[in-house]
């Protein structure tokens, strides 16, 4: 038996999300079907996170157990041949037999992209939220700092309690304004906002944590948008976090702006 | 009779292009159908340029003659209600009766977007060309300067001769590297390349001319890419331009990276 690990990027627009569901096509089903067509085997595929309908991935991690003897170097092109253009296998290699995409993950990085310009651009309709009113990015960034550290994030979870605990640790959190739709390869921009910070039409919220609750990034984004509009202050976000009450937080931002950027595993660096 | 002028943005992915064709849905047909459903009239809609299949628009200009008495301010939302999400009416207003989108245009601005990064991002597959190998943007920009001024551009035209003349005047032409997918609202970046010029994963070619030949921007882009790869120099591009031979130029770059950004009309500023 071998354990094959994949790095996947996908456009979530046409899917009901990662997980196999009755109401539409899923990424998981598409990958399992590709493996089945390639090897003849029916293998369950595990992932680092079950992205929702319309949510995209740049560096989702997945793995599956197989008896196939296909050489490690051939998996990527071979699987790609059975996948549609909106799912890309960025890497495939053999992992230790006990590696598990879900349970071995120690950090995940998400990015939320907002188009904050007057005009509505149809090419972006599935790839960024759109808010016309100019948002105060400095205030949003200040509010994002409130999330850093270990907290009970149930204020930002849909349908709590879903899990044993809603305590998570946020290692990075920041908001910047960018000239263009931000490329996912630039996570370092949080530390050094670019000079376009004043003029850009895009807003990018990056967050890294040891785990995320259901809808956590989207609810935080909806809350930060209220700060950007001037409705709330960073102190309000602190109050909402401490209240442990979902009803006080902002609305859930649309799925289309959310990207799972990368997943880190024990003993590994940032895989972005 | 009234003449209604529209500014349209559209995602060209699902269309066979602007012009009504037998082999698939067109933007023109979608707009004419919306007018028909709104007013009951069958009006031909004219545009500044007939974008090809898969080519996008940020600021296409169109117009049509109507007997409808719908107030000017209501046209935009009323037409939008009958259009799909991938076609957006950015503005609608009443124009002089003799205004014609095609014949009154004095300048058009196109942008070609290239993702020049190692990873293939499925969310961009319909919105930018993708070239893995790092391109030399400074050389591409130098080559783009060769195009400035009035020249016979038949080297960069598919199926010449299509028109009375293939002489056009290029007023702006430049290539920059950008951190993110460049927003269309930043045409001024040509004069002041951003500090990300060395690190960005996106390449943006902007060109403004009094008119364009069939496939002209895409053929120029294919040629500039060969300069970026180091195959050709700016002097080669000058030689190709002067040769007036399409067979010497580069291949036609894919439609998905091309955006019609704006159209200027007599007595008006840049409408981007």
Image (cartoon, coloured by chain):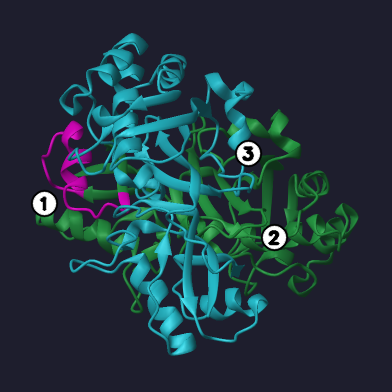
Chain colours: A cyan, B green
Numbered circle sitting on residue B132: 2
Distance, label 1 to label 2, CA atoms, is 49 Å
Asked whether residue B49 appears in the rendered view, the answer is no
| Crowd band around label 1 with a 10 angstrom C-alpha radius: few (<14), some (14–19), many (20+) | some
Rendered position, B72 above or below B80? above
Per the image, the residue denoted by label 3 is: B179
Q: Secondary structure at mark 1?
A: helix
Compare residues A220 and B10 and report the one nearer the observer: A220
Q: Are marks 1 and 3 on the same chain?
A: yes
Numbered circle sitting on residue B39: 1
Q: Are marks 1 and 2 on the same chain?
A: yes
Task: Read off the chain for label 2.
Answer: B
If you read the primary sequence from the N terminus, does the residue marked by circle 1 or circle 3 appear first? 1
Asked whether residue B104 appears in the rendered view, the answer is yes
Q: Position of residue A47 (x, y in %)?
A: 42, 60
The span shown in magenta is B66-87
Image position of B175 (left or right of B184) = right
């Amino acid at each position: 038996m071998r354990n094959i690990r994949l790095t996947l990027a996908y456009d979530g627009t046409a899917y009901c999300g990662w997980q196999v569901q009755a109401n539409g096509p899923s990424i998981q089903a598409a990958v399992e079907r590709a493996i089945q067509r390639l090897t003849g085997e029916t293998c369950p595929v595990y992932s680092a996170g079950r992205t929702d309908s319309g949510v995209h991935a740049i560096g989702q991690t997945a793995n599956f157990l197989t008896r196939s003897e296909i050489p490690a170097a051939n998996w990527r092109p071979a699987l790609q041949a059975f996948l549609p253009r909106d799912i890309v296998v960025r890497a495939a290699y053999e992992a230790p037999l006990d590696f598990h995409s879900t349970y071995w993950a120690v950090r995940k990085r998400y990015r939320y992209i907002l188009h904050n310009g007057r005009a509505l651009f149809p090419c972006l309709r599935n790839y960024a939220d759109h808010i016309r009113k100019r948002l105060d990015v400095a205030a949003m960034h200040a509010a994002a700092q409130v999330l850093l550290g270990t907290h009970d994030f149930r204020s930002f979870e849909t349908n709590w309690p879903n899990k044993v605990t809603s305590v998570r640790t946020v290692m990075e959190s920041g908001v910047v304004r960018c000239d263009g739709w931000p490329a996912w390869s630039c996570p370092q921009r949080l530390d050094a906002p670019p000079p376009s910070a004043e003029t850009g039409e895009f807003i990018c919220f990056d967050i890294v944590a040891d785990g995320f609750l259901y809808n956590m990034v989207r609810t935080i984004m909806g809350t930060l948008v209220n700060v950007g509009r001037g409705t709330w202050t960073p102190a309000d976000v602190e109050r909402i976090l401490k209240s442990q009450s979902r009803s006080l937080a902002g609305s859930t931002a649309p799925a289309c702006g959310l990207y799972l950027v990368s997943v880190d595993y024990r003993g590994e660096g940032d895989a972005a």
